Image (cartoon, rainbow, N blue to C red):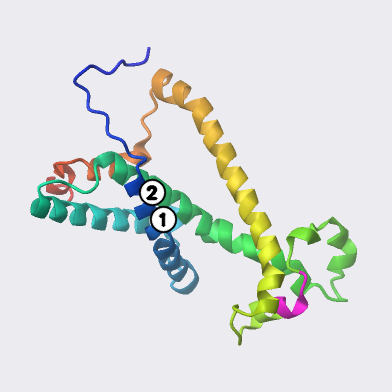
């Protein structure tokens, strides 16, 4: 049986214009930081949940929010807004991670670059590849693997823009399907089976208004 909120229950809105704009500002910064971590330093924070780089950003927002509250007498972000930012940054981190973004880019160019007369890849499975969703310009592929030039050239951008947009559309549709599945399963898992969702407990406790989590002796 679902719990009916009482008249004294305060419902916090998380999906606000403020939280969305702040998330849109943070996503590019988080993505660049994540790419540095995974492609340069090989730390791979997205291999474990909760994602460490997102936790770090949320902690910074909590501290900034606390300082803002001390100065103005009112916090800038409530707990629900902080959680929305955490969720959206986590999703964007997964998409930009080496498990999705990196392998997806490799898929668009790998077969065309490494195919030769010895392995006969194009003869073996070339007809099965979706060439309309791949980068087929050899010059653009060579620049990708060998470097030595900037991506901001018209001929390179033309070679990449169509397959990139197609795969972005594919990811958007995939995320929408997952959200639909989440909607279908939410009531069964949350209200009937009472699943605990332990992975959410850390951000949930971190974002409590009185910062009880940070005062806990176990945290220190």
Q: Is residue 176 magenta?
A: no
| Residue 107 in view here | no
Above or below, 186 relative to 109: above
Crowding at dot 1, Cα within 10 Å, few <14 / some 14-19 / many 20+, comes out as: few
| Quadrant in which the N terminus appears | top left
Residue at 78% over, 59% down: 132
Q: Residue 211: image x %, image y %? A: 16, 45
Above or below, 82 relative to 127: above
In the picture of the structure, the residue carrying the numbered disc 1 is 24
In the picture of the structure, the residue carrying the numbered disc 2 is 20
Please indicate whether residue 180 sits to the left or right of residue 55 in the image.
right
Give residue 98's quadrant in the image. bottom right
Above or below, 151 relative to 215: below
User: Which SS type dominates the magenta stretch?
Assistant: helix
Q: Residue 62: image x %, image y %? A: 22, 52
Q: Which residues are magenta?
A: 136-141
Crowding at dot 2, Cα within 10 Å, few <14 / some 14-19 / many 20+, comes out as: some
Residue at 34% over, 54% down: 22
Residue at 76% over, 74% down: 137
Helix, strand or loop at label 1? It is helix
Separation of residues labelled 2 and 1 (CA atoms): 6 Å
Q: Residue 134: image x %, image y %? A: 74, 63
Q: Furthest-front residue in view?
A: 17
Q: Furthest-bottom residue in view?
A: 148
Please indicate whether residue 152 sits to the left or right of residue 13 in the image.
right
Q: Are marks 2 and 1 in contact (CB under 8 Å)?
A: yes
């Amino acid at each position: 049986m679902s719990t009916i909120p009482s008249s004294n229950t305060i419902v916090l809105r998380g999906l606000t214009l403020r939280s969305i704009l702040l998330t849109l500002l943070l996503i590019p910064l988080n993505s660049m930081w994540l790419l540095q971590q995974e492609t340069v330093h090989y730390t791979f924070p997205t291999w474990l949940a909760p994602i460490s780089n997102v936790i770090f950003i949320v902690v910074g927002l909590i501290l900034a929010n606390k300082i803002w509250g001390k100065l103005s007498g009112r916090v800038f972000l409530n707990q629900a807004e902080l959680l929305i930012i955490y969720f959206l940054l986590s999703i964007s981190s997964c998409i930009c991670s080496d498990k999705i973004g990196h392998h997806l880019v490799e898929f668009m160019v790998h077969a065309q670059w490494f195919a030769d007369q010895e392995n006969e890849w194009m003869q073996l499975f070339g007809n099965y590849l979706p060439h309309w969703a791949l980068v087929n310009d050899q010059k653009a592929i060579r620049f990708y693997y060998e470097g030595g030039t900037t991506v901001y050239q018209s001929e390179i951008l033309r070679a990449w823009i169509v397959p990139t947009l197609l795969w972005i559309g594919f990811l958007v549709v995939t995320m929408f399907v997952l959200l639909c599945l989440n909607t279908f399963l939410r009531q069964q898992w949350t209200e009937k089976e009472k699943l605990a969702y332990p992975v959410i407990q850390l951000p949930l406790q971190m974002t409590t208004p009185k910062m009880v989590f940070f005062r806990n002796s176990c945290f220190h």
